[in-house]
Image (spheres, coloured by chain):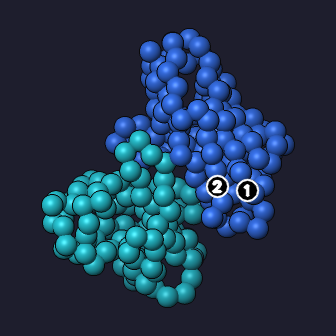
Amino acid sequence: GAVVSQHPSRVICKSGTSVKIECRSLDFQATTMFWYRQFPKQSLMLMATSNEGSKATYEQGVEKDKFLINHASLTLSTLTVTSAHPEDSSFYICSARGGSRYNEQFFGPGTRLTVL
Amino acid sequence: AQSVAQPEDQVNVAEGNPLTVKCTYSVSGNPYLFWYVQYPNRGLQFLLKYITGDNLVKGSYGFEAEFNKSQTSFHLKKPSALVSDSALYFCAVRDIERDDKIIFGKGTRLHILP
């Protein structure tokens, strides 16, 4: 199956700093990437959808100025949490689809963000 | 909008017994349904999917799911549970009304008791 990677797998930062999370499709071209957020013992909530070369579409209630998404190439999308606060601590999971695998959505391993 | 519901927060099953994790769906049109499993501090692992065809779908690790249109259900099953099956299980649906995004149920924690 197709492989999606995320980096870093775990990050700890101080309140007020910005954190960038990378999501890469390793063996296919991802025309669309998705970012999900998961609080402890809860489900995955879709945050935003990005199409390569276009602005991301955010779900209702997600602050676009807080969670900056860039999808500049067919293999890379980044999520930047700006001025992070403790309430932003969560598990962030990206997902990608594209090319001949358009009907399938492949998930990355996730990034655990802890804001002190 | 398309959605799935998982009525159980937690399911406990003795090792060796059959297990069922429930999921019901609400969709317009033909449903595209999925099951994923998540182990602690890990990403999602795909188990199986239903798009069309046989109502009984076989997936990874001995799991299967039965699509029931009349009951709008897509329950996950396994004939004989293993302790290693203990994890968080998510039912999901592709929302064709919203750019085919995958939307997840709240999840069911499965505990297999030795």
What whole-number distance in Å separates the C-alpha atoms at marks 1 and 2? 6 Å
From the top left corner, tell me how far across and down residue B102 is, in percent. 56, 57
Q: Nearer the viewer, residue A108 or A71?
A: A108
Per the image, the residue denoted by label 2 is A3
Specify which label sits upstream in the sequence, 1 or 2: 2
Q: Secondary structure at mark 1?
A: loop
* Dot 2 amino acid type: Val
Residue A75 appears left or right of B105: right
In this orientation, does residue B86 appear?
Answer: yes
From the top left corner, tell me how far across and down residue A86 is, in percent. 45, 19
From the top left corner, tell me how far across and down residue B79 is, in percent. 27, 78
Quarter of the image for the N terminus of chain A: give it: bottom right
Q: Nearer the viewer, residue B25 or A51?
A: A51
> Pointer 2 indicates a residue of which chain?
A
Callout count: 2
* Dot 1 amino acid type: Asp
At a point 43% along the width and 84% down the height, the residue shown is B56
At a point 45% along the width and 71% down the height, the residue shown is B60
Up-down: is A6 above or below B91?
above
Per the image, the residue denoted by label 1 is A27
From the top left corner, tell me how far across and down residue B82 is, in percent. 26, 66
Quarter of the image for the C terminus of chain A: give it: top left
In this orientation, does residue B96 appear?
Answer: no
- Contact, mark 1 vs mark 2 (Cβ under 8 Å): yes
Q: Which mark is residue A101?
A: none
> Pointer 1 indicates a residue of which chain?
A
